[in-house]
Image: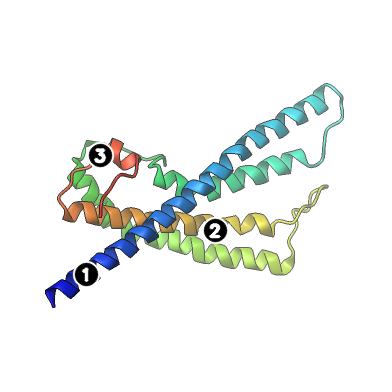
Amino acid sequence: MFHNQRVSEGIGITVLKKVIDGIDWINEWIGKILYPLVMIICLIVFTEIVLRYVFNSPTIWSFESTQFLFIICSLLAAGHLHQKNAHIGVDILYGKFSSKWKLITDILLFPFFLLFIGSMSYFGFAFASDSLLKLERTGSVWDPYVFPLKFTIPIGATLLLLQGVARLVRDISNYRQGKRLSSEMESENIGSY
C-alpha cells in the first residue's frame, strides 16, 4: 500500500513538473517572439522621423502602430518577465529578508496576486469581447480595429497568472524541502520538486 502511494505521488510530481516546465516554455517562447518587436518599433519610429523631417512626408499609421506594438510587448511579456524575476519591485524591506523569509512572503502574498491578476484576466476578457462585438475602431485617420489589441489584456494576464502559479509551486516545494535559494538561483528559475 505504501509503495503504491509513493508511486502515485511520484507520478503526480512528475506530471506537475511537466506542467510547470510547459508554462515556463510558453512564456520563454513568447518572450523570444516579442524581442524582435521592440526592434520593429525602433525601425518604424526611425522611418517616420526620416519621412517626416527629411522628405516632409509623414505617415498616418506609424504613431498608432508603435503604440499598438508597445502595448502588445508590454502585456504579453508580463509572464516572461515574472519568469525571469525582472519586474520592477520595491526592495526596501523585501531586499533585506533572508531567502527563507522571501519564500514565506511570496507564498503569503500569492492570494493578492491571484485576486488582482485573476480579475485582470476575467474583466479584460469581457472588455475585449465587448470591443469585438462592436468591431471597435480607434476613430483616427488610419482607423484600425482595436479589439485584437484589447485581447492582449486577458491573454497577457493569463500568462502572468500561470507563471505566478508555477512560481508558487516552486516556492512551496523549496520551502518544504528547507532550501534557501539565492536571488541568482531564483532569477535562473532553478528549483527542484
Label 2 near label 1: C-beta < 8 Å? no
| Residue placed under numbered mark 2 in the picture | 155
Residue drawn where x is 72% and y is 28% of the image: 46
At label 1, counting other C-alpha atoms closer than 10 Å, the crowd grade (few under 14, some 14-19, many 20 or more) is few
48 sits left or right of 81 in the view? right
Q: Quadrant of the N terminus?
A: bottom left
Q: Which mark is residue 7?
A: 1
Q: Is residue 126 above or below residue 141?
A: below
Judging depth in this view, the residue of 175 and 69 nearest the camera is: 175
Compute the Cα span from label 3 to label 1.
42 Å
What residue type is disc 2 on? Ile
| Occupied quadrant, residue 18 | bottom left
Name the spot of residue 45 as percent of width and height, x first: 71, 32
> Which residue is at the far left?
2
Judging depth in this view, the residue of 90 and 173 nearest the camera is: 173
| Residue placed under numbered mark 3 in the picture | 93
Task: Please tell me whether mark 3 or mark 1 is closer to you in this view.
Answer: 1
Of mark 3 and mark 1, the one earlier in the sequence is: 1
Compute the Cα span from label 2 to label 3.
32 Å
| Occupied quadrant, residue 115 | bottom left
Task: Please tell me whether mark 1 or mark 2 is closer to you in this view.
Answer: 1
At label 2, counting other C-alpha atoms closer than 10 Å, the crowd grade (few under 14, some 14-19, many 20 or more) is some
Residue drawn where x is 66% and y is 36% of the image: 41
Residue drawn where x is 19% and y is 46% of the image: 101
What residue type is disc 1 on? Val
Applied colour scheme = rainbow
Q: Which mark is residue 190?
A: none
